[in-house]
Image: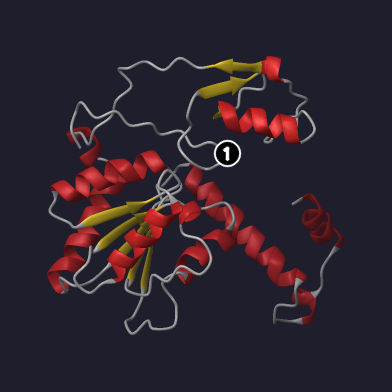
């Protein structure tokens, strides 16, 4: 990625694309100007995120500096997760050059930085995120599915929806834990589809002693809660849902 290339990273929570005419509300949330104005005119005048009462006079334009640029720098290439991912991908490539991998992250900025780093390392990489038009996403995914196509797909789960088949890949990398375990399972299911002929390996990237460890703990609690609530197998005592469990369910 060239140093003089400007990149906008913020996604609009309404259209899920790059924010155009960035605006900030009185409750400190950012949207495309057109999206938030349409939202206020169609629905009750409130913020789509926090539901705080909101009027058009509570919307302010954000002036971005032309110097807000980013490129794949050597400092990012030394990022621990980027280094570990590069090691895994290199090992897979040495073992079988045709191995295809899907890398999931919830942060578009991270995916963009990874794209530059992996391309510099010689990998054939494509990226799919909310800033890419739906039709183009389909073409990118089709290209990735070809035997001679790219070997690494960097993807935001927002952009990889129901029905997408990524069975051409046999490696899945989750670059950070998602608070909802069902979201991770959804990501894995994109690769575990009819037509998958290889053993699929799932690799989770978790930074020790960070909030990511707390997210994993939350995932375990949510899975256990769902298991108890919907009749998981075990002893009678384990299957019973206590009052505390019900309260936890109601508070989710």
Toward the right, the furthest residue is 243
Question: Residue placed at 30% from the left, 17% from the top?
Answer: 67
Q: Quadrant of residue 245?
A: bottom right
- Number of marks in the rendered image: 1
Whether 203 is drawn above or below 3: the answer is below
Q: Is residue 151 left or right of residue 45?
A: left
Which of the two residues, 125 or 81, is positioned nearer the viewer here?
Answer: 125
Which of the two residues, 88 or 237, is positioned nearer the viewer here?
Answer: 88
Whether 58 is drawn above or below 212: the answer is above
Confirm whether residue 78 shows in the render.
Answer: no
Report the quarter where the N terminus lies: top left
Q: Quadrant of residue 173?
A: bottom left
Q: Is residue 22 left or right of residue 138?
A: right
Which of the two residues, 246 or 128, is positioned nearer the viewer here?
Answer: 128
Q: Secondary structure at mark 1?
A: loop
Whether 38 is drawn above or below 213: the answer is above
Q: Position of residue 11 (x, y in %)?
A: 49, 37
Question: Residue placed at 40% from the left, 34% from the top?
Answer: 9
Q: Position of residue 158 (x, y in %)?
A: 50, 52
The residue at which mark 1 appears reads as 13
Whether 176 is drawn above or below 18: the answer is below
Q: How would you rate the neighbour count of disc 1 (Cα within 10 Å): few for under 14, some for 14-19, many for 20 or more?
A: some
Confirm whether residue 130 shows in the render.
Answer: yes
Q: Is residue 226 left or right of residue 164?
A: right
Q: Position of residue 19 (x, y in %)?
A: 48, 32
Q: How is the image coloured?
A: secondary structure
Question: Residue placed at 50% from the left, 17% from the top?
Answer: 62
Q: Quadrant of residue 39?
A: top right
Which of the two residues, 184 or 134, is positioned nearer the viewer here?
Answer: 134
């Amino acid at each position: 990625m060239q140093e003089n290339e400007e990149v906008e990273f913020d996604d609009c929570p309404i259209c899920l694309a790059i924010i155009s005419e960035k605006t900030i509300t009185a409750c400190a949330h950012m949207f495309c100007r057109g999206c938030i104005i349409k939202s206020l005119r169609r629905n009750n005048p409130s913020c789509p995120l926090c539901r705080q009462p909101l009027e058009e006079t509570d919307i302010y334009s954000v002036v971005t500096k032309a110097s807000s640029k980013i490129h794949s720098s050597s400092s990012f290439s030394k990022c621990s997760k980027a280094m570990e991912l590069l090691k895994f991908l290199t090992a897979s490539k040495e073992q079988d050059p045709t191995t295809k991998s899907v890398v999931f992250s919830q942060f578009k900025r991270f995916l963009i930085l990874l794209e530059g780093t992996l391309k510099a390392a010689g990998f054939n990489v494509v990226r799919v995120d909310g800033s890419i038009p739906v039709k183009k996403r389909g073409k990118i995914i089709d290209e990735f599915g070809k035997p001679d196509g790219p070997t690494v797909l960097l993807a935001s789960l927002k952009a990889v929806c129901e029905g997408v088949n990524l069975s051409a890949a046999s490696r899945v990398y989750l670059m950070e834990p998602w608070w909802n375990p069902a979201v991770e399972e959804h990501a894995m299911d994109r690769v575990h589809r009819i037509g998958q002929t290889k053993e699929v390996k799932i690799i989770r990237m978790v930074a020790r002693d960070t909030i990511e460890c707390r997210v994993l703990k939350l995932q375990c609690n949510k899975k256990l809660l769902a298991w108890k609530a919907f009749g998981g197998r075990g002893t009678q005592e384990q299957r019973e849902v206590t009052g505390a469990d019900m309260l936890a369910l109601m508070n989710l």
